[in-house]
Amino acid sequence: MFQPVFTALSSLVSLFSLVCLVRIVFTWIPNLDSSPVGRFLSGLCDPYLHWFKRFSFTRMGSVDFSPILGLGVLSVGAMTFANIAATGRISIGVILAGLLQVLWSFFGFFLGILGIFLFVRLVYDLIKRYEYGPFWIMLDSFLNPVISRVTRLIGRGKTFSYRASLILTFIVVLILRFGLAFAVVFLQTILMSLPV
């Protein structure tokens, strides 16, 4: 008898997730963000999205990834409610798989963005363009802490050129992104099959 309730909850959470996604897009366009619709979406979504700003690991330099974490939590909520509606029971395995998906949705997105930025920076370095505008300064402020950490960890005291460090970090990020994606799918399959 509770299945229609959980179906409705899953739909509502999915709808709210979509509204929050629209709100995030609006923040990229000042004219839309300050419009009546933008202000309405701000009042509706910002209290929820801003709650995740308290987690310091969601920030890398001037870039804030907390909305991704917020959307991931909503996705897990919708999936959990949908599973309860379909099976008629609450499964610990499904909940754990959902929590794993939240973590992966955040870190997977971060690794994907990091890989794209590293690739862009590497191409810029390879074509020998030495103009150094505000965008590249901002990009380097985001990438350099990661590059430094990876180089220190892998190189073990060896000195690398900046280009070699870029290539090394890009390869490590690619391996992590696809290796962890495979591991997460494998673990989720195990968790979803748990009898409780």
Image: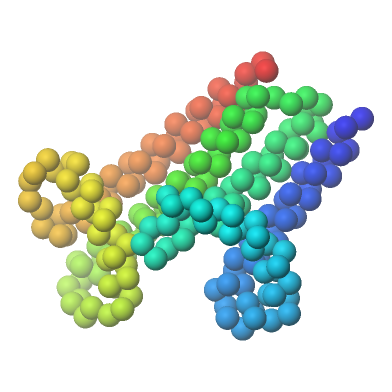
Residue at x 44% of width, y 52% of height: 56
Residue at x 66% of width, y 48% of height: 74
Would you place residue 192 above or below residue 179 in this image? above
Give the side of residue 156 with respect to residue 10, left or right.
Answer: left
Give the side of residue 76 with respect to residue 102, left or right.
Answer: right
* Residue 28, image x, y percentages: 55, 73
* Residue 107, image x, y percentages: 45, 46
* Residue 79, image x, y percentages: 69, 39
In the picture, which quadrant includes the C terminus? Answer: top right
Q: Quadrant of residue 127?
A: bottom left
Give the camera-side residue of 71 and 129. Answer: 71
Give the side of residue 2 with respect to residue 26, left or right.
Answer: right
Residue 135, visible in the rendered structure: yes
Of all residues shown, which one is farthest toward the top?
Answer: 195
Would you place residue 137 above or below residue 179 in this image? below
In the picture, which quadrant includes the N terminus? Answer: top right
